Amino acid sequence: MKSDQISRTLTVAAVQATPVFLDRDATLAVAAGHVGKANSELVVFPESFVPGYPDWVWRRPPMSDGEWYARFVANSVRVDSADLDPLRDAARDAGAWVALGITERSESDTLYNTVVYIDDKGAIAGRHRKLVPTGAERLVWGNGNDHLLTVVEIHGVRVGSLICWENYMPLARMAMYERGIDVLLAPTWDNSDEWVPTLRHIAKEGQIFVVGVTAFLRGSDVPRDLPDAEELYGGDEDFMSRGNTTIVAPGGEVIAGPLIGETGVVTATLDLARIAAGRRMFDPTGHYSRPDVLSLDISEKL
């Protein structure tokens, strides 16, 4: 953290919304609407918000999802195309940065679980691809193979992202600390009781702000023209994701959320002075490190 950031603040809005499941354009319209109303410097969306998280991979037999996967591919996002123009326009009009969870479609048609950053002028500022899809996610997403641990600067504040269970990778967390992040974004599908304590641990371990953001989705949100949708997904009481959106300060204090069981926007003004105050006691890459005993070798590709 630079010395001129000690008195700085960053306003953040974490959007716990419901995507229009497997409909890229309609979900981008939902996201754009939230950006326009957020009145924040940074607006953050959940994991694979566009076109929705592929929850069916946990419910169907492997490789029996041809029509589901085909719709997923058709509604995924090509970052270097016009697909994101509605959100880029919204970011520019609102003068806000956006961190959007997408399923990214590469030129070779491999899909990636990606966070794409759009700056307050509407330009693509970077992306991060999830390093390792978790469990059944490997049936739809490839391992992130570039843009590995991207960090962007938002008004002098260094922001990075680890997606869902990447946050359980100790070396990935340490690499982010060594890259000097002030704010870690943790978009996820995790609804477990352990998730918020995970966010609190990272905030204390790194002495950083952590923004966890989760979607809100029910079985009734799944289009019924997909094969076996009625059998796989019930109605309003069949929750794919109840949400778990939470913002945590350095040291582990929850300052907003968790929001569970409804849609909504969790907001906070992050006081960057709390980072320096916390690192007086514990600085994982400074006085509380022992590089003579332990060190991390980060790939030069980063």
Image (tube, rainbow, N blue to C red):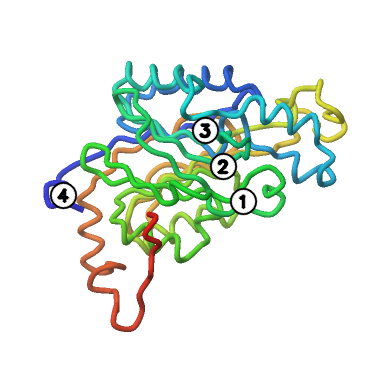
Tell me what residue is drawn at x 50 percent, y 56 percent: 167
Q: Can you identify the residue that label 1 sits on?
A: 133
Q: Position of residue 188 (x, y in %)?
A: 55, 45
Q: Can you identify the residue that label 4 sits on?
A: 6
Going from N to C along the chain, the mark reached first, 2 or 1, is: 2
Is the C-beta separation of discs 2 and 3 under 8 Å?
no
Q: Mark 4 or mark 1: which is in front?
A: 1
Q: Position of residue 4 (x, y in %)?
A: 12, 47
Mark 1–mark 3 Cα distance, whole angstroms, equals: 22 Å
Going from N to C along the chain, the mark reached first, 4 or 1, is: 4
Is the C-beta separation of discs 4 and 1 under 8 Å?
no
Q: Helix, strand or loop at disc 1?
A: loop
Q: Can you identify the residue that label 3 sits on?
A: 16
Q: Residues within 10 Å of mark 4 (few under 14, many from 20)?
A: some
Q: Position of residue 154 (x, y in %)?
A: 27, 38
Q: Residues within 10 Å of mark 2 (few under 14, many from 20)?
A: many
Going from N to C along the chain, the mark reached first, 4 or 2, is: 4
Rendered position, 22 above or below 128: above
Mark 4–mark 2 Cα distance, whole angstroms, equals: 34 Å
Rendered position, 257 above or below 51: below
Q: Helix, strand or loop at disc 2?
A: strand
Rendered position, 253 above or below 129: below
Quadrant housing the C terminus: bottom left
Going from N to C along the chain, the mark reached first, 4 or 3, is: 4
In this view, which residue lies farthest toward the bottom? 293
Q: Can you identify the residue that label 2 sits on?
A: 113
